[in-house]
């Protein structure tokens, strides 16, 4: 059962008009899966909290979306079907290798007096591999990308996807790498139009309300048979492991992957109620293009197999 706080959230923040379409896409995707294929929901990116209904300003959570996009790719390679719930315009699996400034992909080649722009030699193989992999994943129906922007969209989509996945029971894995806002302005408290500055206004005061901890409802009622893995991001290493443990005690799920903002690309800790196992990449690993998500995902896949 959802608690009062969650029910109030869903009443105060009505479903986006896109929800039915998302639900249809997810159900169709699940139907296309062979019976022995596991499905993972990977969430990725920050959630945006608008300050106005006709939004000009907003508050955002930090996330470049790399963890989620890279992990989705490794889950695909491990044979999972991946529902990738990602922040719109954020990084996406396979195409993420080209999501920098597109002008950086090309180089000017001159032959005699004429010249033309071509893909850099160093990127040609990467481009081929990425597009081949993407095509293969599409042919095998292994990847469904669902964009969200706001916190409200994220929460509605998360609940809907979880309910659709209920039918595959323990074959479902939730890998929650998105950075979800802890505070928001409920729709009825939000200014209709752009908040005005001007004479006599020397400060802007906002009242934000806590966002219910949806992880609790995911574990207890939306996806009670699935394996649920959440992430914990902190900037102070002295509290990181304690916060991860607190989440495990509070929500009663299986694993928290803890990371610090400054070292998230090279170090993570796998935290369970009775263990902490750190994984560190060396400088050499990083120089060789090794990605920590490769290791994180293979560990999660092992855990899912053993569950
Ligand atoms: O995207 P990158 O730049 O590559 O960075 C990846 C990352 C650092 C963002 C990622 O590795 C990470 O740590 N993501 C989680 C960030 C975080 O700590 O989020 P949180 O404190 O908002 O949430 C922790 C967990 O509680 C999450 O699993 C979230 O789904 C859940 N939560 C959060 C708030 C809320 N109201 N309800 C929730 O259920």
Image (tube, rainbow, N blue to C red):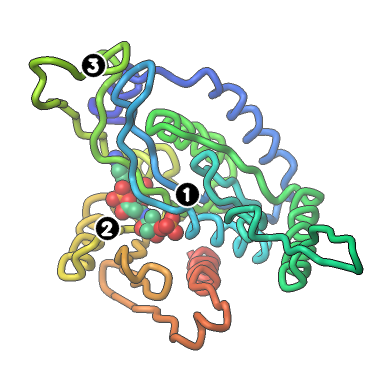
Q: Position of residue 14 (x, y in %)?
A: 39, 17
Q: Which residue is mark 3?
A: 196
Q: CA distance from mark 2 to mark 3?
A: 43 Å
Nearer to us in this view, 231 or 245: 231
- In the rendered view, would you say 58 is above or below 194? below
In the image, taking residue 145 as reference, residue 274 lies left or right, namely left
Q: Which residue is mark 2?
A: 248
- Of mark 2 and mark 1, the one earlier in the sequence is 1
Q: Position of residue 130 (x, y in %)?
A: 73, 61
Extreme residue toward the front, this view: 113
Circle nearer the viewer, 2 or 1: 1
Circle nearer the viewer, 1 or 3: 3
Residue at 38 percent of width and 33 percent of height: 151
| Secondary structure of residue under mark 2 | helix
Q: CA distance from mark 1 to mark 3?
A: 33 Å
Residue at 40 percent of width and 52 percent of height: 63
Tell me the crowding category of disc 3: few under 14, some 14 to 19, or many 20 or more residues within 10 angstroms, Cα based.
Answer: few
User: Quick check: marks 1 and 3 in contact, CB under 8 Å?
Assistant: no
**Quadrant location of the N terminus?**
top left
Circle nearer the viewer, 2 or 3: 3
Extreme residue toward the right, this view: 112
Nearer to us in this view, 134 or 216: 134
- In the rendered view, would you say 97 is above or below 63? below
Q: Is mark 1 within 8 Å of ligand 1?
A: yes
Residue at 25 percent of width and 34 percent of height: 211
In the image, taking residue 21 as reference, residue 161 lies left or right, namely left
Q: Which residue is mark 1?
A: 44
- Of mark 1 and mark 3, the one earlier in the sequence is 1
- Counting every numbered tag in the picture gives 3
- In the rendered view, would you say 261 is above or below 177? below
Q: Quadrant of residue 268?
A: bottom left
């Amino acid at each position: 059962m959802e608690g009062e706080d969650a029910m109030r959230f869903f009443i105060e923040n009505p479903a986006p008009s896109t929800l039915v379409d998302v639900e249809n896409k997810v159900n169709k995707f699940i139907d296309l899966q062979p019976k022995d294929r596991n499905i993972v929901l990977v969430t990725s990116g920050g959630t945006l909290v608008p300050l106005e209904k006709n939004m000009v300003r907003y508050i955002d959570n930090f996330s470049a979306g790399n963890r989620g996009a890279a992990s989705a790719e490794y889950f695909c390679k491990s044979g999972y079907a991946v529902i990738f719930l990602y922040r719109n315009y954020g990084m996406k699996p396979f195409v993420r290798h080209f999501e920098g400034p597109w002008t950086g992909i090309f180089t000017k080649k001159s032959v005699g007096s004429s010249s033309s722009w071509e893909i850099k030699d160093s990127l040609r193989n990467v481009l081929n591999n990425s597009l081949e992999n993407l095509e293969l994943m599409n042919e095998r129906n292994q990847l469904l990308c669902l964009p969200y922007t706001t916190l409200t969209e994220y929460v509605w989509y998360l609940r809907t996807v979880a309910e659709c996945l209920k039918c595959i029971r323990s074959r479902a894995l939730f890998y929650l790498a998105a950075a979800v806002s802890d505070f928001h302005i409920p729709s009825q408290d939000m200014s209709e139009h752009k908040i005005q500055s001007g004479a006599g206004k020397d400060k802007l005061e906002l009242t934000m309300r806590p966002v219910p901890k949806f992880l609790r409802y995911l574990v207890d009622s939306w996806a009670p048979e699935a394996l649920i893995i959440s992430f914990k991001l902190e900037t102070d290493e002295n509290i990181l492991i304690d916060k991860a443990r607190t989440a495990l005690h509070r929500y009663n799920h299986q694993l928290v992957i803890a990371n610090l903002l400054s070292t998230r690309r090279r170090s993570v800790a796998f935290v369970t109620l009775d263990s902490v196992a750190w994984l560190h990449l060396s400088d050499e690993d990083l120089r060789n293009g090794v990605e920590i998500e490769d290791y994180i995902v293979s560990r999660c896949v092992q855990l899912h197999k053993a569950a």
